[in-house]
Image (cartoon, helix red, strand yellow):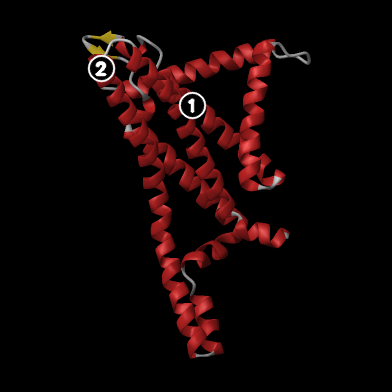
């Protein structure tokens, strides 16, 4: 009785897949792993290894891994599930029920927006509210600069305007993260439709292989960027620790 996007239905399908996987994993995983468990553990090791390379800190890796790990797996599945033959061809009343979730800008924008908001919360927690605001409004630095002299004061003014520009950069993170993922996945869907419609065998097979690669790479890029932004958000905490 109300409209719902086919990409949203795909997200619900992905959630259902995760629920089934979780139930299966909790009942079959053991101390002596089988083949399936080994694959899952290897995926875990690869993701935590990627996070460790970016953070260079076991402490921060453990903190952010639940978010980054969940996001990477979600994006990888969301990017790949649309490649299952026939899935996006299922229709109801002549309309496709499922479409790629990450080829819908609403999905990528919502995810990027949530990640950037989370990063602001992390930065406030790490630096305190005044330290957080001080990154953007550097009144203290300007005051201290002019106390030292005109030259230092003018340099501090440049830093003050750079801080104001950093406010824009925080919003730019949302746009860049969401558009990068959306643009690549939407372009992939469009090109796949054209190629599959124009050619029969060889070229679609090559494009399908490339799509599998791009789907995983884009998930890794998104997760790696969020991890890097996280480390910038807690940079002062790292300096205090050192």
- Asked where in the image residue 5 lies, by quadrant, the reply is top left
- Asked where in the image residue 54 lies, by quadrant, the reply is top right
How crowded pointer 2 is (Cα within 10 Å; few <14, some 14-19, many 20+) is rated as few
The picture places residue 141, in percent across and down from the top left corner, at: 53, 77
Q: Is residue 23 above or below residue 160?
A: above
Q: Is residue 47 above or below residue 135?
A: above
How crowded pointer 1 is (Cα within 10 Å; few <14, some 14-19, many 20+) is rated as many
Residue at disc 2, secondary structure: loop
Q: Which of the two labelled residues, at mark 2 and mark 1, occupies the earlier sequence position?
A: 2
Residue under pointer 2: 1
- Asked where in the image residue 86 lies, by quadrant, the reply is top left
Q: CA distance from mark 2 to mark 1?
A: 32 Å
In the image, taking residue 92 as reference, residue 155 lies left or right, namely right
The picture places residue 60, in percent across and down from the top left corner, at: 66, 46
Pick the residue in front: 216 or 17: 216
* Residue 76: mark: 1
Quarter of the image where the C terminus is located: bottom right
Q: Nearer the viewer, mark 2 or mark 1?
A: 1
Residue at disc 1, secondary structure: helix
Pick the residue in front: 15 or 229: 229
Residue visible at 51% across and 82% down?
A: 143
Residue visible at 45% across and 67% down?
A: 163
């Amino acid at each position: 009785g109300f409209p719902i996007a086919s990409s949203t239905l795909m997200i619900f399908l992905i959630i259902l897949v995760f629920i089934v996987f979780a139930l299966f994993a909790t009942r079959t995983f053991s101390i002596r792993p089988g083949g399936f468990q080994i694959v899952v553990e290897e995926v875990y090791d690869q993701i935590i290894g990627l996070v460790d390379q970016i953070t260079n800190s076991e402490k921060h890796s453990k903190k952010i891994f639940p978010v980054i790990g969940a996001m990477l797996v979600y994006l990888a599945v969301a990017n790949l599930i649309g490649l299952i033959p026939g899935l996006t061809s299922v229709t109801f009343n002549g309309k496709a029920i499922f479409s790629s979730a990450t080829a819908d800008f609403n999905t990528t924008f919502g995810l990027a927006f949530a990640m950037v908001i989370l990063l602001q919360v992390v930065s406030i927690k790490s630096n305190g509210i005044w330290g957080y605001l001080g990154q953007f409004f550097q009144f203290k630095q300007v005051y201290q600069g002019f106390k030292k002299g005109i030259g230092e004061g003018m340099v501090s003014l440049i830093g003050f305007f750079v801080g104001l520009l950093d406010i824009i950069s925080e919003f730019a993170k949302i746009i860049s993260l969401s558009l990068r993922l959306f643009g690549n996945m939407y372009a992939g869907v469009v090109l796949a439709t054209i190629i599959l419609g124009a050619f029969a065998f060889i070229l679609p097979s090559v494009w399908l292989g490339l799509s599998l690669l791009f789907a995983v790479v884009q998930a890794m890029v998104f997760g790696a960027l969020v991890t890097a932004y996280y480390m910038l958000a807690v940079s002062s905490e790292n300096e205090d620790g050192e």
